[in-house]
Amino acid sequence: MRLSIRWKLAAAFFLITATVLMVSNLFILRTLELNYLGAREATHLANANIIALAGREDIVHGDRNAFYLARNFGAQIQARVLILNNNGRVIIDSFDEPWLVGQVLRHPEVVSALAGTSGSGLNKVSDAETVLNVAVPVLKDKQVIGAVMVVVDVADVYLTLDGIRAQMIGVSFLSGLLAALFSLALAGILTRPLNALTRAVRRMESGDLNQRVAATARDELGDLGQAFNSMAVQLESVDRARRDFVANASHELRSPLASVKALVQSLSDGDERNPEVYREYLRDIDSEMDRLNRMVDNLLHLARLEEQSAPLNMENCDVAELVDHVTGLMSTLAATKGITLGKSASGRPNQSLDRDLIIRVLFNLVDNAIRHTPPGGRVTVEAEVGKTTLLFRVRDTGEGIPEEDLPHIFDRFYRADKARSRATGGTGLGLSIVRQAVTRHGGTIEVRSKPGHETTFEIKLPVKH
């Protein structure tokens, strides 16, 4: 059986309230009992001391006057007065009952009084009767010669406590009922955001990612709501990116495939017999297949980079050697286009990097720079190792990037000039790979550009000591 968290919370609140009420009632009743009995004890200890002082001489001589004193005083205070000798034997009973006279009492309060200290205690005479005994010593010449014991019925005290208990039970029942209603209402208020969150999650589960919940409360539920909204935004963004990626990838893959199909169909349908024409067609098909292969390779590489669980192959690298290696690879392309390729490196040479990944990053940036720089231009690769930052810069004096395109150049398949980018053989994935590789190293990448003059890509990586 499924039990709602609302009922669980309501039950918990009610149990807590009921427990507090019960403990409070018990504490109050016990406090009242002690106060009532304490007041009664103090009163009769004073009365017993008065009798002990007033009748001391009569008690010493065993005079009959001691009996009258005990009887009269007992009648005034509505209590039984017993006078005992120094052995604890009853010698006078204000009720004048023969069976008690001559009895030796061993109550703790009597023992205490005969030892020179006043004492008191409750004594249950029967199931329906409880009495309070107080005893004080009778002194002569600082010697204990006997004791006076006052026995008082405290049934009225417990009768009063029973009345208070009955009232408290009634009040507690009403309080418990109100607490139950309040607990249910409070549980409903507390679980309302959770219910809204559950409904939103279920709608997201069915595919509707455009879900948000109210997150105005400044507590853990508010934090949970904000976390859900943030997650929903990210999921929506990821889903949009996924759909855009599928659409873009399909479009980009369709282009070379369509070209290959058209070329093959032309060869199949035509009656051309010139081998040179066939070779030209095959070269075009080979070029399109190379483009398709580069695109698939970049897609796979980007997917591996986005796999956060895949570790980087970190090793101790010579930064200057990396720059030399990349410029060496690109020198032929630069020379072919009539572009000057410069390089520089400064600072401590050895750094912990994924060598192959950084080479690919620099290769992509330099390749882009060369392809988009006109003949006679210059491309420069720089590396600077500071105390906390490793800095790579790739500068070119090329055509630049329009300002409206700068925020999007790292997006997959984005091209500032689509026709020209395809003409240069780009796949639209190189800069996405660059950004992801830099991010995996814990770094950042920025781009500055003046259209028609220059473009600078700047990579900042943390230096690990």
Image (cartoon, rainbow, N blue to C red):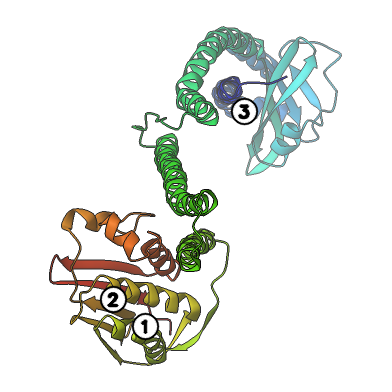
Earlier in the chain: of badge 2 and badge 1, it is: 1
Structural distance between the alpha carbons of marks 3 and 1:
121 Å
Residue found at x 55% / y 51%: 268
Q: Which type of secondary structure does the marked residue at label 3 adopt?
A: helix
Q: Which residue is mark 2?
A: 370
Structural distance between the alpha carbons of marks 3 and 2:
121 Å
* Residue 62 visible in the displayed image: no
Type of amino acid under label 2: Ile
Q: Position of residue 228 (x, y in %)?
A: 44, 38
Q: Which type of secondary structure does the marked residue at label 2 adopt?
A: helix
Above or below, comparing residue 415 to residue 452 in the picture:
above
Q: Position of residue 101 (x, y in %)?
A: 82, 19
Which sits in the foreground, 361 or 94? 361
Above or below, comparing residue 113 to residue 182 in the picture:
below
Q: Which residue is mark 3?
A: 52
Callout 1 environment at 10 Å: few (<14), some (14 to 19), or many (20+)?
some
Is 334 on the left or on the right of 317, as rendered?
Answer: left
Q: Position of residue 196 (x, y in %)?
A: 46, 24
Earlier in the chain: of badge 3 and badge 1, it is: 3
Task: Kindly indicate whether the residue at mark 1 contacts the one at mark 2 (C-beta within 8 angstroms).
Answer: yes
